[in-house]
Amino acid sequence: MRAGLLQLSVGDLPLENVSLVREAVRQAVAGGAGFVLTPECTNCISSDRKHQQGVLSIEAEDPVLAMLRDEAARAGIWLLAGSLIVKTGDPEDARFANRSILIGPDGAVTARYDKIHLFDVQVSETETYRESAGIRPGDKAVVAKTDFATLGMSVCYDVRFAPLYRALAKAGAQVLTVPAAFSPVTGAAHWHTLLRARAIETGCYVLAPAQCGQHPQTTGRRRATYGHALAVAPWGEVIGDAGETPGIVFADLDMAEVENARHKVPALHHDRPFTAPESLT
């Protein structure tokens, strides 16, 4: 299976992002991809919660998802909407979901995963994120069957939480998806290392489509993301890196490489029980 990882620079208006994302998907298909992956926040990047309330929709009405489902059916491909920011309709929690959605070759949604770990950090005195202020966290890990591999789904900040990926691999995942909109500061310091580590620990392919550059904003503070959409093989080698500008990374997936890596270092079968230390603080 050839995967096509999209690297995009979307803005804060979902309707305007439709054509940009559609063109990238079609370019990936033209390059031979039978599995196309889009990054986190494919439909909208914005820090303005009031603006998001005005332009975002529930999943069933999201225009980017509708387009992606049409494109998957048109081309007969598997397509991962890396994540969409969608309204949940929950009357008790008005926050959005940051939702990764897997679409089958018939255009039907086959799996959903709501981001569990939310990016509440202060990177510097001038760069602070409080994702939980606008996003409701998920609480369920998800593996999804396709006709070429079993996928373990995740989103961006999840990548810092290794036990999630070990659980996905133990549940059968051969390919880990990590769509992202990584901060330029943390991306430069940690992105490649974290993704390679998740591949090495699990013997999985890691596919991480990404947002990049300065994002067009009609309101709110400016947003920039790191880029470097990355494909990592099960032994940990980087097999594709999109750099810092919009584009596509192609990666040819061979599940025999998953078995080969796990045969060499069968760490998934070497767990031992242990007693955790008591906290000294």
Image (cartoon, helix red, strand yellow):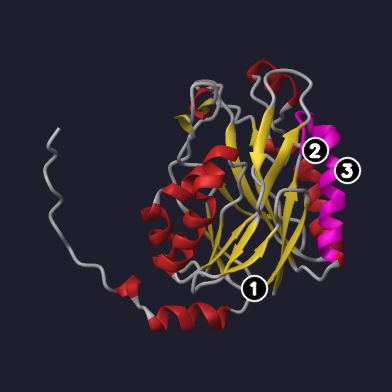
Dot 3 or dot 1: first in sequence order is 3
| Disc 1 residue type (three-letter) | Asp
Q: Secondary structure at mark 1?
A: loop
- In front here: 183 or 185? 185
Q: Which residue is mark 1?
A: 147
Query: Which circle marks residue 19 in the picture?
Result: 3
Up the image or down, 105 lies above or below 53; here it is: below
The foreground one among 214 and 97 is 214
- The magenta-colored residue range is 10-29
Q: Secondary structure at mark 3?
A: helix
Q: Residue at x 48, y 31 (%)?
A: 123
Taking the spot 88% from the left edge, 51% from the top edge, the residue there is 23
Marks 1/2 in contact by CB < 8 Å: the verdict is: no
Instruction: Give yes or no for residue 13 being in the magenta stretch.
Output: yes
| Residue 61: quarter of image | top right
| Residue 219 lies in the magenta-colored region | no
Above-or-below relation of 278 to 23: above
Q: In the rendered structure, which disc, 1 or 2, sits on the residue that comes first in sequence?
A: 2
